Amino acid sequence: MNPHLSGDEISKYLMGDASPREAEHLRDCAVCSVEVARLESSFAQFRGSVRRWSDQEEQISRVREVANMNYETHLERLLIPASVDLPWYKGIVISVKELIHPPKLPPLEVTSKPVKLASLKGLYGGHETTAGLGSVIAHVGVVALLLFAGTLKPVQRAMKEFVPLIAPDLRPLQPKPKPEQSKGGGGSPQKTAVTKGELPKIAPKSFVPPIRPQDDPKLAVNPTIVAPDMPNINSPNFGNPLAGLGVPSAGNGIGTGIGSGKGPGVGPGSGGGIGGGVYKIGGGVSAPVPVYRPEPEYSEEARKAKWQGSVLLAIVVDENGLPQDVRVIRSVGLGLDQKAIEAVQKWRFKPGQKDGKPVPVSANIEVNFRLL
Amino acid sequence: MPKLAPVVEAPSAGGLNDFESLVQQHRPRIFRFLIASLRDREAAENLTQDCFVRAFRARDQFRGGSTLGTWLMHIAANLVRDHEANSRLKFWRRKLQADVDPNDLSDWIPDQQKSPEALALAKEQVDAIWRAAANLSERQRTVFLLRFVEDMDLLEIAEVTGMKEGTVKTHLFRAVQSVRLGLEQRK
């Protein structure tokens, strides 16, 4: 006897696609025929259910249909009426034709007639005047009552307690722009530090350094420095009035000022003014604008560690727009600080300006390191 | 039907002359197939109407190569396919259809004089088949319903669906396998 039918073969038999061998086997084999009979009965149940269900549903829909329409118009309802079933181009042609030659409509036949309604007269039973007057009096009374209420003291007081909200004037509270804090510095390059002496004349621009004036100049120019008003002393030579005594010197700085700094000011800073440091943004000093800023590279360690963060750098942008004196204020680590400094040193700026002239300005720069 | 006389008497293929009786004769079958495919009475009603309208419009194209019932069923199968394609775009609608409670169907098991156990078993089985059929693809379901509800043989199904016999076999085989799987899991 043949082996039992596989599941696939049973499915094939159910499909009606069984080979003669399989059919023969089913006739002989009790096990397989039971299995197939079980499945067939399930499918038969299913068939019966679907048929009964659809018959029922059809009855419902048929009942509704019959209720809705005359039986004879069955096919008519199925078809779209010819008047509607026009192709679109014909519709356009007809519309245009009707626009040019409006079809003459049959004269309008008015089938309805005006109906005379019962007059409104007499609805008030002859009290029209009274009613009108009453209405006027009632309205006048209400208005007068409102006006009278407005004159009462308690009402006025209550109205006064009503405080309208007005946007407060915050101008005095707004932060004042910082007074100009230009730090100065300067000095002619000399070995010794600045000594005590009289400050040169203060001017907006320094042409001649206070020390080592040219002998026998063709056009004598008084030495000047760029500095705010400050206490001065009488002294035979120029110097810093706050410095100690010594060999006359304008300091070991660079420029035309006095002191150890750089530029035409007084003190250890750079630029004009007195004291240390450079100009700061604000108070007439515009911020430097970066014009060329190459992206920082990622350090290998940080890339491996998937390290992210931002480095805060303090720089001084000099008059030429070059970053100087780059320092780290907030560090991230893993070599990113170094990379940030390297990148920022390549940056170029439009220098900050004071009174239309480029000046060295200190600025903070945040360099972001983000891994995608 | 005095109004429809010209239409009815129009010269055309065989059984199409009396359209009214044609509708009467084939409507239940078409409707059954459509409602079993779509599980939505409204849609089945509409598509049944559409089916006869199409048949009426295309009555000249009917050459009598197949029986009238097969031809109408072919139209219906096409309509089901179009409908599925349309409702695929409206996925919410599809979801709504999938939500039809298959328990509705097991209430319609014929021969209610069965013992309660047998009835419960039959309900289970019908339920399982109905659920499994719901998860079939549109083609598989069409083929499955044509075979097991309409009792068509493979050649007829091929004619109705416009597929080759081999294709029909493949779809039907997969459908039967899924349904059997559904029945097994139910046990």
Image (tube, rainbow, N blue to C red):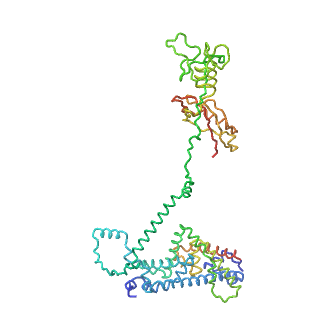
The residue lying at 35 percent from left, 70 percent from top is: A91
Image vertical order of residue A278 relative to residue A31, above or below: above
Which of these two is toward me, B81 or A167? A167
In-image side of A166 versus B62 (left or right): right
In-image side of A104 versus B105 (left or right): left
- What residue occupies the far bottom of the structure in this picture? B113
**Spot occupied by residue A70 in the image (x, y as percentages of width and height):** 44, 86
| Quadrant of the rendering where the N terminus of chain B is positioned | bottom left
**Spot occupied by residue A115 in the image (x, y as percentages of width and height):** 35, 81
Inspect this view and state whether residue B71 appears: no
The residue lying at 67 percent from left, 35 percent from top is: A329
| Quadrant of the rendering where the C terminus of chain B is positioned | bottom right
Inspect this view and state whether residue A53 appears: yes
Which of these two is toward me, A45 or A258? A258
**Spot occupied by residue A292 in the image (x, y as percentages of width and height):** 55, 35
- What residue occupies the far top of the structure in this picture? A216
**Spot occupied by residue A38 in the image (x, y as percentages of width and height):** 68, 82
In-image side of B34 versus A306 (left or right): left
- Res A277 quadrant in image: top right
Q: How many marks?
A: 0
